[in-house]
Each structure stands twice: as C-alpha cells, then as structure tokens.
Amino acid sequence: MSAWIPPAPILAHLVLIFIIFNVLVLSAAFMVWMERKVCAYIQDRVGPNRVGAAGWLQPFADVIKLLTKEELRPKAADALLFAIAPIISAAAAFAAFAVVPFGASTTLFGLLDEPLPLQVTDVNVAVLVIFAITSMGVYGIVLAGWSSNSKYSLLGGLRSAAQMISYELSYGLALAAVIMMAGSLSLREIVLSQSGYWFGFIPKWYLWPQLFGFFIYMCAGVAETNRAPFDFPEAEQELVAGYHTEYSSMSFALFFLAEYVNMVTVSAVATSLYLGGWLGPFLPDWLDWIWFIVKVLALLFFYVWMRWTLPRYRYDQLMEFGWKWLLPAAVLNLLYTAALVLWLQG
Amino acid sequence: METAAFYIFATIAVLASLLVVGQRNPMYSVMLLITSFGALAGLYVLLDAPFTAVTQIIIYAGAIMVLFLFVVMLLNVPREEPAPSAAASLLGPSGLKIGAVLSGLLAIEMVWALSRLPAKGFDADQANQVSDVRNIGQVLFTDHAFAFEATSVLILVAMVGAVVIARREH
C-alpha cells in the first residue's frame, strides 16, 4: 500500500499553511514575552528573567500551566455557547491572516515548477474578507459575555459589541481610502502598487499620502482588538476581567491567543496597506519576508508601548471620540483621497 | 466537488433557517441566522460572486446581526415563553389562516419566478462581469444611479426616524 502523496504545489501550499499557523501561535507567545519585558522596562523593572535566558521561555511555561489547569464552567452558564465562544474568537483571529501576503513568490530554489506566492490565498476581494472576518470575531466576545451568565461578563460583552460597531465604520472608511488609491481590493496588488521611490530614497508607501488615514486605521484597529487605551471589554478595575471573567484553563488561553493574533493581523494589514508590505531595500528577493516581519514587529512594539504609556479612557470618551471625531475625520479623509486620486490622474 | 459543496451549503442554509424559527432561546435564533447567512455566502462563492459573498458577511452576518445580538442581550430574555394573550391571536385560527394565505402566495410567486428563468445554462463570462467589483460599481453609479441614491435617502430617513422615536421624551 503506497501512501498518496499530494502533488508538489498542493504539498507546498499545505506546508505553507502549517508554517503560517505555527508562526502565528509562536508570535502570540513572543508578544506575551515582549509585552512583559517592555512593560517591565517602562516601569523600571526587569520583567520575567527566571525561565530561560532573559525569561524567553516564560510564555511556554505559562502555556503548560494553562494546559494543566482545571476547566471550570459556571453552573448557570449556557453550556454550548460557553464552549464555542472562545473557538469563534480564535478561529476568526487566525482566519483573517489567510489573505495577508508576506512576501513575493518563491520557487524554493527551483524545487517547484510554479512560483508559490507567500500567502495562503490571493482573493481579489482580500481587503473586504479581512473586514468581514474581523466583524465575525466580535461574536466570540459577545457570546462569551452572554453565556457566562455573570454581570461582569455581560457588561464586557455589551461594551465590546458597542465598541466594535462604533469603530468598524471608521476602520472600513480608512480601508476604502487605500483601496481608492491602489484601485484594487487585492492586498498583493496594493502592496505591489507601492513599489518604487520618490527622489530615489523615499519609498512610495501609502503612509505618506494617507498619513491621516493611517492614524484613523490604527485608532480603529486598537479599538477593534480591545487593547489599551481602549480595553473596555476587560477593564479590570470595573469589570474584574470583563467577558472572560468566568473562563479558565485553555478556553481562557484561546481568548488570550485570539487577542494577540488579532494584534498581529491588524499590524500585518497595516503593513500591507500603508508600509509597502514586504518591499524593502538591501535584501535579496527570497528574503523579502524579513522586511515584512520587521515592519510588523515595529507596529506591535508601538501597540505595547502605547498600552503601558496611556491610561484607559472613560467609556463615554471612547464613544464620543469614535462617533464625533474619528468618523467625520474618516469621511473627510475619504473625500481628500478621492480629490487626490482625481488630481493625480490629471 | 462543486455539486457536493452546493448541497452542503444548501442543507446548512435551509436547516439553520428552519431552526431559527423553531428556537425558544432568541440567542440561539440569532446564532443560527448567522450560520444561515454564512452558508448563503458560501453559495455566492460557488456562483463566482466573491464580492456578493463578502458583502453578505459584512453587512448581514457582521453589522446587522451584531445589532440583533445587542438588543437580545440588553433585554436579556433567557427564554421566549409560549405565546401569552397578546400573541395568541396570531397563533389562533384566524392567524393560521393569514399564515396559510401568505405561504400560498409565496409558493405561487416562487413558481412564477422559476418558470420565467431562461433555459440556458450558467454563463461564465456573464458571471465574471457580475462578480467584478469595478463593473458592479460602474453599473451601480450609471444605470442604477437613481435606485442607488433613492435607497441611500431611504436609509437616511429610517435613521432619522429611529433617532426621533428614541428621543421622543425630550
């Protein structure tokens, strides 16, 4: 009996998916470590330094701890929804990364006949797919809040739903501005349209014409991923731990994982939309994904930096900022972009 | 492969829609409706209309259902009790008759619409034209510009109306 071996392109694709999935999981572990280290230095501490050199094994120790803990469920909780809520959260977080390109094509030094694009799938409506999947992620949080049958969880879930609805509009309008400039919905084409330099050294990133749009995107992105200073769904001083108060063990870990993977996805999409994706100087073509990782890491560092620098807003301030400032700004940005595109086309 | 995918999505869509009506718990109804919308999006992908599929998810499964969920959570009705007096009239004999008439009308309408379908098969060229975002935009803002603008005014009216109703006490 000979095992069926899939043809090379499919095999390469499966390996690629496997690698992306594991890199995302590892990136979450790395983010936990970086978050604790950076926050420690910001607060003039050392941070984790016992497990492994400079504490880099700490996240793995945490995972083992979480895996061996008892799984608890409140008696009054809705068993089915309580169980699927963390799964929805994590699945949505991972799924969004499927359309993000992180490098040009590779043939693995001639191993493959057809060059393999470094991306799970290149759909021609990629930007909208990301938008759709992000809007699905909120169900995990909302269901967790409702099914726990606890006041704190419910309030966390409600806050999250309201926050997502409010900031999704600005998020979408910021995306629309970039789509207009690139004239395409495919992330790969958007990245490729940013190649080249002005005056020989300023990269033609959409960051420059869309400086304002980038700001709007990042604000909305922080709100969508429930990170400080917009981390109301889990504001610990008011809500214990918000929507995941009743969760323990691996189901809690799934929420934790989803939050970090979402941050990576938001940063990766920002990199593709505004920072020229994998494009960069000095590196040979087959190493261009290093540029992608460097840019994503810079944005992630910014995320962490912001969390440990800025205090949380008040909830009414969040709503006021979202509806009265960010949304009108996003609309103005869209109008400005439309004018710019028409002017550039002559 | 495609036929199998069609039947899987179709089964999910029909089953989920039926279960939406059958649920006592409004929370489950909302989740099943989202499932049904997801299966419909899958069908759109099979029809080579990824744009329609994604907008289906963004608008219905994403935006509208989050609002539904929000309302269900705010009211926090754990279970829907079997129809009390006010709703009883709908389930009474006269209500059943209205339901029967409506179902009959729907069935006639479906038969009429299906019988008017052109006999020719699936046209890939035409499908590509429909699925291309650029074409959709062009058609929307030229041929159907009036309908498009009228719809946006309609939505604006609905929004203003909702605000007026919500703030009546002031």
Image: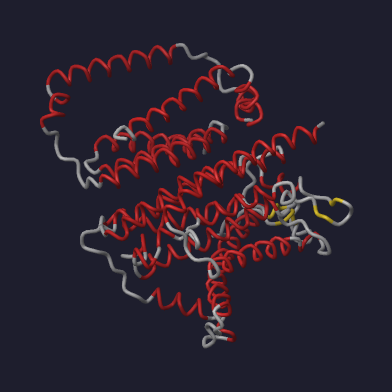
The residue located at (55%, 54%) in the rendering is A221
Most extreme residue toward the bottom, as rendered? A50
* Quadrant assignment, res A283: bottom right
Judged left or right of residue B105, residue A211 is: right
Give coordinates of residue A158: x percent, y percent.
36, 51
The residue located at (70%, 47%) in the rendering is A210
The residue located at (39%, 53%) in the rendering is A159
Give coordinates of residue A160: x percent, y percent.
41, 53
Residue toward you, A128 or A213: A213
Judged left or right of residue B152, residue A193 is: right
Picture colour scheme: secondary structure
Image vertical order of residue B27 relative to residue B145, above or below: below
* Quadrant assignment, res A75: bottom left
Most extreme residue toward the right, as rendered? A200
Residue B133 seen anywhere in this rendered image of the structure: yes
* Quadrant assignment, res B87: top left
The quarter in which the N terminus of chain A is drawn is: bottom right
Image vertical order of residue A153 relative to residue B83, above or below: below
Judged left or right of residue A196, residue B33 is: left
Residue A7 seen anywhere in this rendered image of the structure: no
Judged left or right of residue A193, residue B147 is: left
Give coordinates of residue A21: x percent, y percent.
56, 61
Give coordinates of residue B130: x percent, y percent.
60, 26
